[in-house]
Image (spheres, helix red, strand yellow):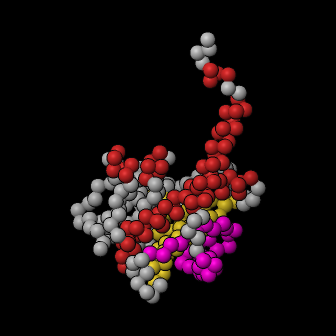
Amino acid sequence: MNRFPFSKTRPMQIVAGLFLSVVMALAVMWGYGLSDLPTKEEREMKLPGDDLLAGDRTVRIQGAVTIDAPREKVWPYLAQIGQRKAGFYSFGLLERLATFHIYNTFRIVDEWQHLDKGDYVFYHQNGVGSEVQDVAWGEYFTMMSDSRRPSTHQGSIAWKPPFGLKHFAWTWSFVLLDNGDGTTRFINRCDASWAPFGGWRFAAIALALGSPSLFMCREMLRTIKRCAETEYRRPLVDRILGFGAPVATGGRDVK
């Protein structure tokens, strides 16, 4: 009797199964990530941060959601974004599985309500992040990371471009538009630039970096919407496993 029936599995079946799993995962990421797109007018709208990579050939991903709350209730959640603060309001468990020590906080923490030009927003504990380029309190802030001009902020690192690229840069802008009826349009826009631009590297970056970015940013939009509209609780899996960053003194819910 063969005690190891798995050993007879054909290698091609294993490869096909892995390939199918990857395709399905990408389909889920892109399907979910593209579920909240800006309108045609919003896509063509000139927004803060659009000129940060002026002269570069860029690719843009963006999302938008309408929040049933005024900008002053949404902004505090944006002001405390970052790995060393409230996290990114996305899939925390997935982020931690990808080695990011991110523990989302879904309450406003007074000690984290500072955001100025030149600040550094950490993504990863190893120093990867973006430097804040411009802030209009309560309206927008923009960030950029560029391997050609690395940040000198303490704790930041100069990110080495992947896939043998000469440079890699990206911007990340968070914009709150007042709809005039007590609601807010939250637009999240990211531009990326690299060289060489085309060929297989374009596909590699779109799949390896674009897919998770779309997926995670879509969840961020949804979570910030819920936080601003009503009190938000940590995901069930985080509560069961005890995950979640402690709320510092002064933490409060915005009602």
Q: Is residue 152 above or below residue 137?
A: above
Tell whether 14 sits left or right of 243: right
Q: Is residue 155 above or below residue 117?
A: above
Residue 88: image x %, image y %?
A: 44, 60
User: Depth check: 15 or 105 in front?
Assistant: 15
Residue 249: image x %, image y %?
A: 23, 62
- Determine if the magenta segment contains residue 60: yes
* Quarter of the N terminus within the rendering: top right
| Location of residue 105 by image quarter | bottom left
Q: Is residue 193 above or below residue 97?
A: below
| Location of residue 245 by image quarter | bottom left
Q: Is residue 24 above or below residue 18?
A: below
* Quarter of the C terminus within the rendering: bottom left
Residue depicted at 53% across the width and 72% down the height = 64
What's the magenta region? 39-67
Q: Residue furthest bottom?
A: 180
| Location of residue 192 by image quarter | bottom right
Residue 96: image x %, image y %?
A: 44, 48
| Residue 209 visible in the current orientation | no
Residue depicted at 67% across the width and 22% down the height = 8
User: Depth check: 155 or 236 in front?
Assistant: 236
Q: Residue furthest top?
A: 1
User: Depth check: 224 or 144 in front?
Assistant: 224
User: Depth check: 71 or 161 in front?
Assistant: 71
Residue depicted at 74% across the width and 52% down the height = 200
Q: Residue furthest front?
A: 1
Residue depicted at 32% across the width and 64% down the height = 107
